[in-house]
């Protein structure tokens, strides 16, 4: 995976679905009881961040699957 910018659900997600419902491009989905954001579909509109009452979504530069694995490990998800 090449480097890209995008949003990541890091921790504290309550699975309420508000972010998914407000996403205009359908980039947010649930997998293994965790919210995921498809960075290829995401148009960086920030609507999900505005809608998330738990502040569980952050914007960051992604450096492929290695960084995603480290983030999930830090959040206790692996």
Image: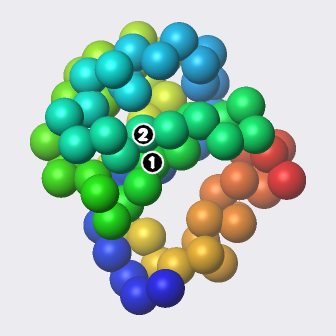
The residue singled out by tag 2 in the image is 28
Give the x, y percent position of residue 11.
62, 34
Left or right, 42 with respect to 34, comes to left
| Crowding near the residue tagged with mark 2, few <14, some 14–19, many ≥20 C-alpha atoms within 10 Å | many
| Picture colour scheme | rainbow
The residue at 70%/66% (across/down) is: 69
The residue at 14%/42% (across/down) is: 45
Give the x, y percent position of residue 35.
57, 36
Left or right, 10 with respect to 17, comes to right
The residue at 19%/34% (across/down) is: 24
In contact (CB < 8 Å): disc 2 and disc 1: yes
Q: Report if residue 12 is visible in the image.
A: yes
Q: Which mark is residue 13?
A: none
Left or right, 2 with respect to 34, comes to left
Of residues 7 and 36, which is closer to you in this image? 36
Of residues 26 and 19, which is closer to you in this image? 26
Give the x, y percent position of residue 43.
18, 53
Q: In the figure, 11 relative to 78: above or below?
A: above
Q: In the figure, 36 relative to 50: above or below?
A: below
Q: Quadrant of residue 71?
A: bottom right
The residue at 54%/44% (across/down) is: 36
Q: Is disc 2 placed on a helix, strand or loop? A: strand
Give the x, y percent position of residue 52.
38, 19
The residue singled out by tag 1 in the image is 37
Q: CA distance from mark 2 to mark 1?
A: 5 Å
Q: Quadrant of residue 28?
A: top left
Left or right, 23 with respect to 71, comes to left
Indicate which disc, 2 or 1, sits on the residue closer to the N terminus.
Answer: 2
Please state the total of marks drawn on the protein image: 2
């Amino acid at each position: 995976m090449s480097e890209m910018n995008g949003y990541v659900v890091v921790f504290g997600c309550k699975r309420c679905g508000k972010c998914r419902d407000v996403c205009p491009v359908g980039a947010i989905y649930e997998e293994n009881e965790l919210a995921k954001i498809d960075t290829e579909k995401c148009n960086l509109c920030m609507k999900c961040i505005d809608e998330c009452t738990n502040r569980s979504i952050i914007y960051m530069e992604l450096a492929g699957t290695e960084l995603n694995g480290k983030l999930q490990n830090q959040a206790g998800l692996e």
